[in-house]
Amino acid sequence: MIITARCNEKVKLLRRLNNDKKTREENSVYVAEGVTLLSSMPENCSVKSFFIRASADVKVRDIVNKFPDAEVFVLADDVYDSVSDTVSPSGITAVIKRPEPESIKGDVVLVLDGVSDAGNLGAIVRTAVAAGITDVITVHSCADPFSPKAVRASMGGIFKINLTSDPERIKDVLDGYDFAILDMGGENIFRFERKNKTALVVGNEAHGVSEEMRRLSDITLAIPMVKDGVESLNAAVAAGIATYLIKKGDLL
C-alpha cells in the first residue's frame, strides 16, 4: 500500500524527526537518507523503519532486504519529496535507533567544544573514522551529531564512531589523557610528538576553545599559517589536519 497523504501520521513523524532534535531524542532515533549513505550502513545498525519513494529503483530494495526486521513504508513520490531532507532525493530514508555511548577506549579521542555547524561536525566525524579514531565527545552545546545534516556530512562515519555528548565531568571520563587544545598561540603541531593518550580539543568556529577546556589543557597546539595569509582555518579542516598529525605514528 502506498501512502499518498502528506498528513499521514507516519509522514508527520518523519518530518518532525528530520527537523526537531527534541523529537529525535524523545524517540531515541536519528534519520539517515540516501542510497550512497545507507549502502555503507553495517548490518548491526538497529533500523526501526524505512521510507521509500514509490518510483525508487532496485538499489533501494537491496538495502531494505539487509534489515528484515525494519518496517517499510512506501510513499507516493510527491509525499516522499515533501518530507525529504535532500535537494535531489534518491528515494530511501532510514529511521535508526540511536546507539548507547560506550566506554572510551581509543588512545586519541576527539573532543568537540561547541562546534556549532552540523556540516563541520559531520565532516570531523568522517575524518576521525578515516584516521582510526573510535571516540568523539561533544561538549558545550555542539550541533547535534545526529541531525540529518551532520549524518549526511559524516558519509557513513556516524555508523562507526562512539559518540558521547556532554558528560558531567569530562576530566573523569578522560582520566589519564593529556588534553591538547587547538589554538593559534600554541606550539607548532608539526613538531609535536604524542607520548601519552591524548584528548584533542577542537573549539567553536567563531570563539575557539572554551575557558573550561583551557583550564584542563596540558598542551596547546597551533597549525602554522604563512604570514599575510588567512586569519583562520575552517574548524573541520583544522580538526582534520590535527587529527592526522597526532595519529601519524599509528598510520605510518
Image (tube, rainbow, N blue to C red):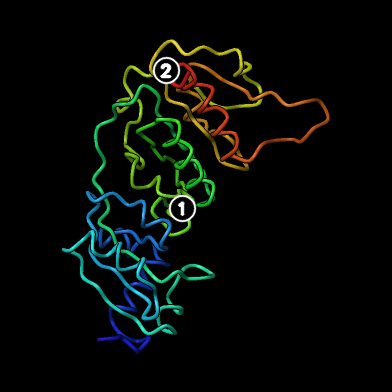
Is 207 placed above or below 27 here?
above
Residue mark closest to the camera, 2 vs 1: 1
- Number of disc labels: 2
Q: Position of residue 107 (x, y in %)?
A: 36, 21
Residue that carries the numbered disc 1 in the rendered image: 150
Q: What is the crowding at mark 2: few (fewer than 14 residues within 10 Å), some, or many (at least 20)?
A: many
Q: Which mark is residue 178?
A: 2
Q: Residue at x 40, y 67 (%)?
A: 18
- In the picture as drawn, the residue positioned furthest to the bottom comes out as 5
Instruction: Identify the element where label 2 is drawn.
Output: strand
Identity of the residue furthest to the left in this view: 69
The amino acid at mark 2 is Asp
Position in image of residue 75 (x %, y %)? 34, 81
Which numbered tag is attached to residue 174? Answer: none
Disc 2 + disc 1, Cβ < 8 Å: no
- Residue at image point 38% right, 77% down: 53
User: Could you tell me residue 185's position as x and y percent?
Assistant: 66, 22
Q: Residue at x 28, y 59 (%)?
A: 96
**Earlier sequence position, callout 2 versus callout 1:** 1
Q: Quadrant of residue 65?
A: bottom left
